[in-house]
Image: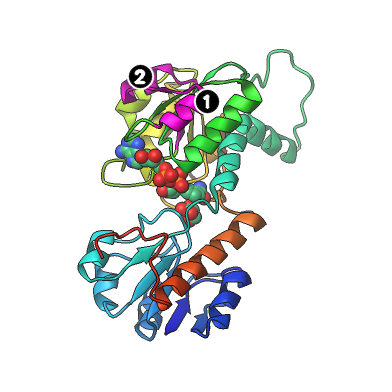
Amino acid sequence: MKVLVSLNFPPLGIEMLKQEGLDVTVWKNDIPMTREELIQATKEHDILLSSSIYTLDADFLEKNKHLKLISQFAVGYNNIDIEKATELGIPVTNTPNAMTDATADIAFALMLAVSRKMFHMHKTIISGDWGHFRPQANLGMELKGKTVGIFGMGRIGSEFARRCLGAYNMKVIYHNRRPNTEMEKELNASYVSFEELLKESDVLSVHAGLSNETKGLFNADVFSKMKSSAIFINTARGGLHHEKSLIEALQNKVIWGAGLDVTNPEPMNKDNPLLNMENVAITPHIGSATVESRNEMSRLVALNIIQFSRGEPLTNLVSPGV
Ligand SMILES: NC(=O)c1ccc[n+]([C@@H]2O[C@H](COP(=O)([O-])OP(=O)(O)OC[C@H]3O[C@@H](n4cnc5c(N)ncnc54)[C@H](O)[C@@H]3O)[C@@H](O)[C@H]2O)c1
Ligand SMILES: O=C(O)[C@H](O)CO
């Protein structure tokens, strides 16, 4: 079987595929393929090792309906039209757990950075303005004992909540599709309604995947129900928050600050007002960017392909209808 590795992925998984005797083509460029390049290259392969930066919509899948498997190098797969893939009989797999710690760390780092205006202070120093000790300037807020609200208490949400409890003894509340009794026991976390999550959270961190249900969920109405002292953190997908509403909520002090590892679009326009706000910290979708995480993603993405080529059950199948 011929496998197209569509980005310059870490070698571990690519070696696994070669050792398995699969015919592997690697896109060795750090700049992704254009859509047309991806469509054309995929035509000559049976399996696509894909990434969340590529849009595998109905049109792409129709043009490549011969595909036997899409093995996605990510836990999120909102870039793939799963319904269409299922209709065409193309199984899709992902790489859960590989980046749970790394992404929870980024959410935690953003929370801390926002609470102490760290990115802004860094920019101020670089601009040559060290300033002097001013008793009433640059004041942040402390996190100890505050309430953290988790939207999406899955793998990453739980790991982030563990950090909040362990480091700052924060009270954990959460809203999820269904109660997570394990986390309730371990973290003394309380399941609350979405409205209560908005009302009670000092820090609200988003960890649910992007879907029709969650797209644009964090809009002006939602921000207006949060505390004016609240920090909003999103490390899930930029599409979960409505960007204009977030900008206005921050400008009008409807909420206090925001930390984002994901934006909509990515990359952001460099004139985006969020980039010049004091109480905002932004990183360019680096949740999974650690050596450990990327190696494990590489191993898993290859394992999914190897399981498929051997005719074994797919541990990480996300299109169960196939
Ligand atoms: N920034 C990054 O680099 C990065 C890295 C990894 C994952 N992510 C994102 O994080 C997301 C979560 O990853 P995970 O491994 O924790 O997934 P997960 O499936 O373990 O957790 C997601 C949780 O959200 C809940 N959820 C989904 N839709 C909901 C809704 N409408 N209302 C309430 N709860 C809802 C689910 O029940 C689940 O508990 C991924 O889908 C991906 O988009 C981002
Ligand atoms: O979903 C994921 O795993 C990350 O966002 C990387 O795409």
Q: Quadrant of residue 44?
A: bottom left
As drawn, which residue projects farthest toward the front? Answer: 312
Q: Amino acid at mark 2?
A: Glu
Taking the spot 28% from the left edge, 80% from the top edge, the residue there is 66
Q: Residue at x 48, y 22 (%)?
A: 230
Residue for point 32% across, 33% down? 178
- The C terminus, quarter of image: bottom left
Q: Which residues are magenta?
A: 180-206
Check contact, mark 2 vs mark 1: CB within 8 A: no
Q: Which residue is identified by label 2?
A: 196
Which mark, residue 63? none
For residue 72, which quarter of the picture?
A: bottom left
Whether residue 190 is in magenta: the answer is yes
Which residue is rendered at x = 39% and y = 83% of the image?
45
Q: Are there few (<14), some (14-19), or many (20+) residues within 10 Å of tag 1?
A: many
Residue 181 lies within the magenta run:
yes
Q: Which residue is mark 1?
A: 187
Q: Position of residue 311 (x, y in %)?
A: 38, 75
Using the image as rendered, state which of residue 72 and residue 258 is in the foreground.
72
Q: Residues within 10 Å of mark 2 (few under 14, many from 20)?
A: some
Q: Which tag is nearer the camera, tag 2 or tag 1?
A: 1
